[in-house]
Amino acid sequence: MYWLKALTEKIRNLIDVLSTTGNWGEIEVGLHECDKAVRRITHNLRNAVTIGEKQRLSSALNTIKSYRAQIKHLIKKGRGLRETAKHRVRWEDSESAFNNRIHTGIITNLQHKDPKYFLEDSKAIFGRRLQYVLKKNSAVKVNVSFCGEFVISKADKVISELKYFTTSNSPIYQDTNISEWFDSKVLHPIMKQLQEFQEKDSGWALKKVVNLGVNINLFNPMRGSSYIDLPSYIKNKKACVNVKNDDQACFAWAVVSALYPADKNSDRTSMYPSYTSILNLKGIQFPMTIHQIKNFENQNDISINIYTLKLNMCKYTVVPFRLTKKVRDKHVNLLMIHNQYYDEYKNSFEGESDKPFRTHYVWIKDLSRLVSSQLSMNRHKKHFCNRCFHYFYSHQKLCTHMDDCMKTDVCIPQLPSESEKVLRFKNFKNKCKAPFVIYADMEAILVPTKDVKEYQKHIPCSVGYYVKCSYDDSLSFYRSYRGEDCMRWLCEELKRFAENVETVFMCSYDINMTSLQEEDFQKSNFCHICEKPFTYEDKKVRDHNHLLPTDNYRGAAHEGCNINFKDSHTIPVVFHNLSGYDAHFIIKDIALAMDGRVDLLPITKEKYISFTKNIDDSSVSFRFIDSFKFMNSSLDKLSSYLTEHPILKTEFSQFTEEQIKLLTKKGVYPYDFTDSFDKFNYPHIPSHDQFFNRLVEKNISAEQYKHAQLVWNSFGIRNLGEYSDLYLKTDIILLAEVFEQFRSSCHRTYNLDPAHYYTLPGYTWDCMLYTTRQELELLTDYDMVYSFRKVYVVV
């Protein structure tokens, strides 16, 4: 967004001039420029699609509004108006493109030079706004962004830039002390960030405080409600008391049932005294929120631990949710249950999934009985730590452990067993290159919509893939398809390819050795797979490549190593920027059009590092990986480093050297112009203006357009459809060239194939273990974990 940066720079320079000259005519021009900028940015903000674009536009809008407020302040100052605290800072509402945002505002600095004084003045106006918002909302989450103008001297030139310092999203409740919250969540963190930024030898110095952006977001904390029945699996343990209340005070009834346990009919409210008569509920609102529990503990001198349930494979497990910081003489363990649970394995909700989500509290009268079976099948009496669920067979050991556990973070350590405590390199099969790798890409038409937020709908229009065979180049090939059903075509192609590859794996070749290789086998003292020596007890066998008909002997190996050193039946499918774009279009068809389970490696619910498609009744699976996770750069930049193009020359062997040279550079494509399938019949190359990309607000350069014209004319392209097909094929082949050279270089250096891995960090970790042959002993004892946690390293 070059225009955005230029616009902000123009108005900032205008402010500097106005603050020194004070010319009334120039001030009116400044106000007019600010108003125009606000209208333009607001329009773009309402049509913004990506989160990054929304954030950049929101920041720019806040900055321009602050500049406008500063110009108006200059007018008041020129008229000699008296300045008070409210004239030193000013609140102004701002536009937001985020659906979960209640309110967005900016506090503009009109006079302050010191950021600390500006923030202290901002506290009062911030507090008044929050009090107004909290009248309509019981709780909100707030984060702020401090904007300052910084300068740096480089080569006798002073460079000025706006820098932003943000805080984390933190909750504010109706009973929160807003002044204390502002000091701890805004004032101190921002002053610390400013100090660290200017002290870390960056050279930047704060010239001017611009504003403080305030984002007030929706927040619905969990609340206890009326009665919910326990899941049968938990109820049968008879470890909980579930009072059948008909009001919103299930939390209070659960606490009362713990303080005054009933001998019979413990689920009836009539068996207990009224909670209003024995509990101090001053300032407590029902349904109970997690935030209020701390106040409840202090007012009643009771400590409360909250646990909840997780559902996986139809089985419930108990996990800590909220643990007290101080265990008191009166201590109560509560279980927070819901009317519906999400089963992670089945990927579906269990319970009242058709009704609103509700929460209910019950008293845990026997924590040991509740969690014992999920931690150990040993039926001996166990003493459980109610924080980390570690158990002991004596009360004395538990007390010793509790002293350490209370000083550490709340978590349940998952420790390896004795047989798994040594971490060493095990993936020797990854030394063998993946026999097949698929490189793929897709293109989409951008159909305009009437939605101001999602102004374009991306519809896949073409897809292509290139299969690279590592042991026989004659088996490598390229295919593509253009049409509305291109994603289904890809699924059919993958199913057909899986059948063919499975046949290749099943019809393996016998070993074919020469006499010299047999002699070498007899003399071998080391396994060529694990590289360890043979002992008298070891059985030495001949390892060979089952996919090659002749000269397929690889070396002597341990019998166990040879069995595990199999050709991978998982075919990597490589997309560039899979996580950021392509996965959104292909995963639905991959999941539904092909029978078999999909295994996800997610970043979020909508963004994935990788996903693997398992095909029913087949040993072959497809693992979709992102080459961007290995080479974090654009394909254009990566392909510019290539010196040789063997795949490109093979796939375009019918063309001349001059034509192939044109394809070694990544092409350009008129994405916004291609808004329907009819455009593929367009008989001419689109004009330079029609290559404008609305998403990045940028057009291609004259040099890039000239290159596109050369490609169109040199290859005798007759319509935009043929240009699209060539563009797609070139992209895929360049991706294959880049990743294949990356694979070859890594395999030569580290003897491991990166195509077997999900990301570069995972590959690097295995390379370290393989190269160093270090064995790392993992902790298997909880007490050892807590001993390490108590050690603080002072630098």
Image (cartoon, helix red, strand yellow):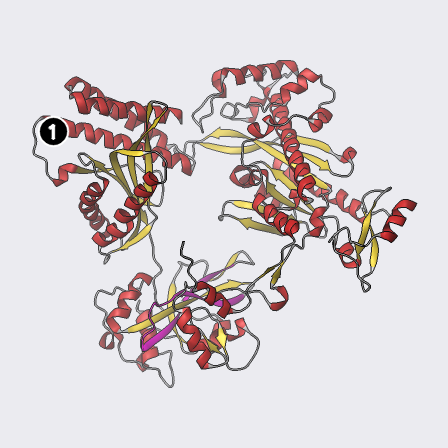
Q: Is residue 26 left or right of residue 710?
A: left
Residue depicted at x 18% and y 23%: 20
Which residue is outermost to the right? 515
Spot occupied by residue 161 in the image (x, y as percentages of width and height) = 33, 30
Hey, which quadrant is residue 357 in on the image? bottom left
Q: Is residue 639 above or below residue 751?
A: above
Q: Main secondary structure of the magenta part?
A: strand
Most extreme residue toward the bottom is 263
Q: Which quadrant, please, contains the N terminus?
A: top left
Q: Quadrant of residue 514?
A: top right
x, y (%) of residue 329? Answer: 31, 78
Is 95 covered by the magenta stretch?
Answer: no
Q: Quadrant of residue 283?
A: bottom left
Is 342 contained in the magenta span?
Answer: yes
Instruction: Looking at the picture, tell me which residue is in the foreground, 397 or 312.
Output: 397
From the viewer's side, name the closer residue of 403 and 73.
Answer: 403
Total numbered labels placed on residues in the image? 1
Where residue 411 appears, as percent x and y from the top left, is 45, 63
User: 198 or 120, which is in the foreground?
Assistant: 198
Q: Is residue 750 left or right of residue 535?
A: left
Q: Is residue 513 visible?
A: no
- In percent of the image, x 24 and y 52: which residue is there? 134
Three-letter amino acid code at disc 1?
Answer: Lys
Q: Secondary structure at mark 1?
A: helix
Q: Percent position (x, y) of residue 497?
A: 72, 41
Query: How many residues crowd around disc 1 within 10 Å: few (fewer than 14), some, or many (20 or more)?
Result: few
- Look at the image and tell me whether residue 449 can be seen: yes
Question: Would residue 5 appear left or right of 601 to someone viewing this image?
Answer: left
| Residue identified by numbered label 1 | 77
Looking at the image, is 734 positioned above or below residue 557?
above
**Residue range of the region highlighted in magenta in the rendering:** 315-343
Q: Is residue 291 above or below residue 205?
A: below
